[in-house]
Image (cartoon, grey):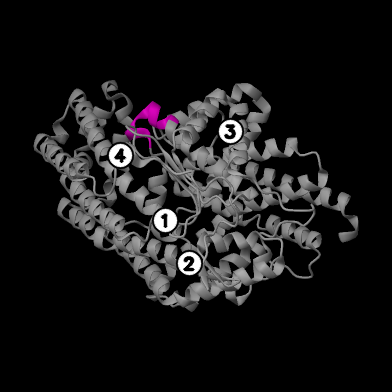
Amino acid sequence: MTDAAPTPALNGAENVLWDLSVFYDSPTDPRLQADMDQITQQARAYADTYRGQVASLDAESMVDAMIATEALRDAAGRIYTYAALSFSTATDDPQIGALLQKVQEWSAQLEQLTLFFDLEWKAAPPEVTEKLLNDPTLGKYRYPLETELRYTPYTLDEAVEQIILEKDVTGRDAWVRFFTQLTSALRFEFEGEQVNQSGIMAKLYERDREARRIAAASITDTLKSRSMELTYIFNTLAADKAANDARRGFPSWITSRNLSNKAADATVEALINAVTSRYDLVARHYRTKRALLGYDELYDYDRYAPLPLTPEEQTYTWDQARTIVQDAYTAFSPRLGEVTARFFDENWIHAPALPNKRGGAFASPSVPSVHPFVLVNYLGKPRDVMTLAHELGHGAHMALSSEAQGITGLYTPLTTAEMASVFGEMMVFQDLMKKEPDAVARLAMLSEKIEDTFATVFRQISMNRFEHGMHTARRTEGELSTERLGDLWIESQRAMFGDSVTLRDEYRLWWSYVPHFLGTPGYVYAYAFGELLVLALYNLYQQRGDAFAPQYLDVLAAGDSDYPHNILARIGVDLNDPNFWNEGLNAIEALVVQEEQIARELFPERF
């Protein structure tokens, strides 16, 4: 057997590498240690200045303290970003792995030095905090100080908080890193070759059904070979979260995520209930797809099969993908086009699919003194173009909020963090649909878009239901077996597909490669939140036309400068209305109805 690169053919992405020299020249750059030492000294000076004084600061002094906090966070963030981005493209490099570990340990020590500030602020008498928050001198710092107080009931004393920070490095963070290294090193057999995760997942989108079946079997076999380690990692991190949640007094496993997302429990519950109540849309689509494919039964490995309605599957070079995405963004807003162009022109993107690069895609906000970065594993498929549009939406959002708000308002809650990325996908999709003259090709594009939407809305909520089951069971039943986790997984997935897709027993292991469950527990519902929000925003765009673009960019630039419901209220969106989610779901239903009608018109003999 040979160790094959996952890229099936040259597509122009091979040399699209990000430039990290804006940080350091290499993992052994002596400036790294020198900067770490200097920042540590600055943190100690910060502690000497403000420890024991936070509750007595007047508004002017508090502003000075917040500016000093921002400077520390930016300086430390540069070092952490460099280590994390370097690791993401070379997870097997021991030198880079050692650097990441060193930086994580140092970051925890830094947090221990500065932890006192937030603790003293939350411990201040209510009359003190209220008086300070009402002082207009605070300006943009009022909001972060106010939101920090929401954690007061769940905050422990300083000694315990310091221990948690210290132990996370060798506990939770270490297990997450091990999972990343383990899954990045997995190799999947396919036709005599060994491919990585990105390569094998791409096979599930092949036209050839036998190729998809073989790829699915390979995924299952490889996950099964590591099921002991993966099951143990999931159990360990679920137990770690349970212990932390209990010590802090969080009422449920999802509470900490909702607080971080600045989303009310009732809002999240309304979202989940709305989406699960419309699982029928998933079944309707897959019944249509089954008819178009001419299958008697649709299996789990058929979910992403392209419709064989056109002579050959479209592929895109990197330059073509750039043009498609760039044109769509620029047509919507020249300003947005300028921002996204910088990612290409100034080497802010890492694009090739490499053997030991982490799978999937992400955008990193980095810090305001630098700029965001985007990672994709580009294989030239239509979905890779949409992924590029998605991640550049994140990147543009981060660039705009970083410029307008600085580091304090840069890191948006996960729920609204998905807003720009999904909107970017929608712009590209609509642009491609307008330019496609062939009705059959448009049907295939529509089908793929529906499945992308389902993956963002229904699949993510079904995974949220798996998470709910996993965390609940781990807390009530103890350590969970691979089989028990498989039961929870298959139950959540069958609830979504109904009888439209046959989920084989082999699919029971496919929970075990999803990183979000471990690195950011509770994350996944944010995708559904963002998608349904974007469908509502896109309706506003269609109603308002060009006037909508500057309003939308103002929302992106607002970043985390206010509660999401306040920011979106500026353009007429009410996140607190439980019926809001139905607007997005109705838009999805309209796509499904459109697909059904076009399919029956073009291929009446298949229905």
Q: Counting other residues with Cα less than 10 Å from the Cα at mark 1, is it few (<14), some (14-19), or many (20 or more)? A: some
Label 2–label 3 contact, CB within 8 A? no
436 relative to 58, above or below: below
490 relative to 140, above or below: below
Q: Earlier in the sequence, mark 2 or mark 3?
A: 3
Q: Earlier in the sequence, mark 2 or mark 1?
A: 1
Query: Which residue has dot 2 on it?
Result: 469
Which label belongs to residue 326?
Answer: 3
156 relative to 296, above or below: above
Examine the image and state in which quarter residue 140 appears.
top left
* Camera-side residue of 546 and 34: 34
Q: Earlier in the sequence, mark 3 or mark 1?
A: 1
Q: Would residue 469 be seen by someone viewing this image from the given angle?
A: yes
* Camera-side residue of 153 and 79: 79
Q: Which callout, 3 or 1, points to the residue nearer the camera?
A: 3
Query: Looking at the picture, how far across and down is residue 406, in whole percent?
Result: 34, 30
Which label belongs to residue 23?
Answer: 4
229 relative to 600, above or below: below
Q: Residue furthest right?
A: 605
Q: Is residue 418 one of those drawn in magenta?
A: no
Label 4 sits on what residue type? Phe
Query: Looking at the picture, how far across and down is residue 313, in whole percent?
Result: 72, 53
